[in-house]
Amino acid sequence: MATAPKKTIAKKTTAVKKTAVKKVAAKKVAVAKEAPVETVAAKKVAAPAVKKAVKVSSDERYVYGVGRRKTAVAQVRLYKAKGEPIHIANGKTVREYFGTQSLEDNALSPLKLVGLEGEMMVSLLVRGGGKHGQSDAAKLGVARALLVHDPLLRSVLKAQGMLTRDARSVERKKPGLKKARKSPQWSKR
């Protein structure tokens, strides 16, 4: 008796699966009818336009750059300044956020190098790491954004090492050791 109900259950589940497959296929057809058809050539043309990183946000154009250092990541937006330029980091002024003049100068040094510090407004979103790593990440992000803004600045930025990503980071701890390389104290007996 136990075998008969199993067969009917199996038949019901396959019927349910078939109807589910039909519904999914019908949805795909409906979505395909609604969505405009793009050719392969149109997709290739549209992709490079997105990579330029120039977007419009509340009637302001900006250029975008990302910088990294250790575990810190800085997302940078450069705007054309209308009047006095304001430099913002995580909702505060850059000086308030970093706390010292040296870290602020380090983060904005690419602007000073090319002479655009009075003409560009900087917006930073910085995460991870400490203040020094975040400052270096912001420096790389600002330099990359300037490169998108004006590719002719590459030689000036490259000569000062502003476009080089500092890849040094903390080495991982190995099993059996106290730290990354420090071994446990040796005892003779």
Image (spheres, rainbow, N blue to C red):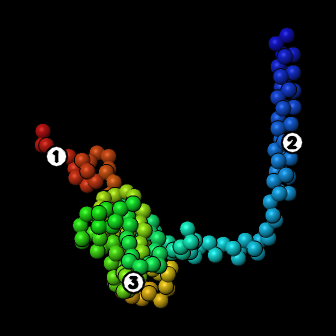
Q: Secondary structure at mark 1?
A: loop
**In-image side of 182 versus 9 (left or right):** left
What's the residue type where badge 3 is placed?
Answer: Leu
Which disc is residue 90 wearing?
none
Give the x, y percent position of residue 77.
47, 70
**Mark 1 — residue?**
185
Q: Which residue sits at x=39%, y=60%?
A: 91
Labels 1, 2: front one: 2
Q: Does residue 95 appear to the left or right of 15 in the view shown?
A: left
Query: Upstream in the sequence, badge 3 or badge 1?
Result: 3
Q: In the image, which disc is placed on residue 22?
A: 2
Write the residue at 82% across / 51% down.
Answer: 28
Q: Is there any visible trace of residue 35 in the rendered image?
A: yes
The residues bearing labels 3 and 2 have C-alpha atoms spaced at a distance of 61 Å
Question: From what the image shows, is residue 76 above or below residue 151?
Answer: above
- The amino acid beneath tag 1 is Gln
Spatial separation of the CA atoms under disc 1 and disc 2: 69 Å
Q: Secondary structure at mark 2?
A: helix
**Left or right: where 120 falls relative to 43:** left
Of 170 and 44, nearer the camera is 44
**N-terminal of the two: label 3 or label 2?**
2
Q: Residue furthest top?
A: 1
Badge 3 element:
loop
Q: CA distance from mark 3 to mark 1?
A: 55 Å
Quadrant of the image for the N terminus? top right
Q: Residues within 10 Å of mark 2 (few under 14, many from 20)?
A: few
**Which quadrant of the view contains residue 141?**
bottom left
Q: Earlier in the sequence, mark 1 or mark 2?
A: 2
How packed mark 3 is, by other alpha carbons closer than 10 Å (few <14, some 14-19, many 20 or more), is: few
State the residue position of label 3.
Answer: 116
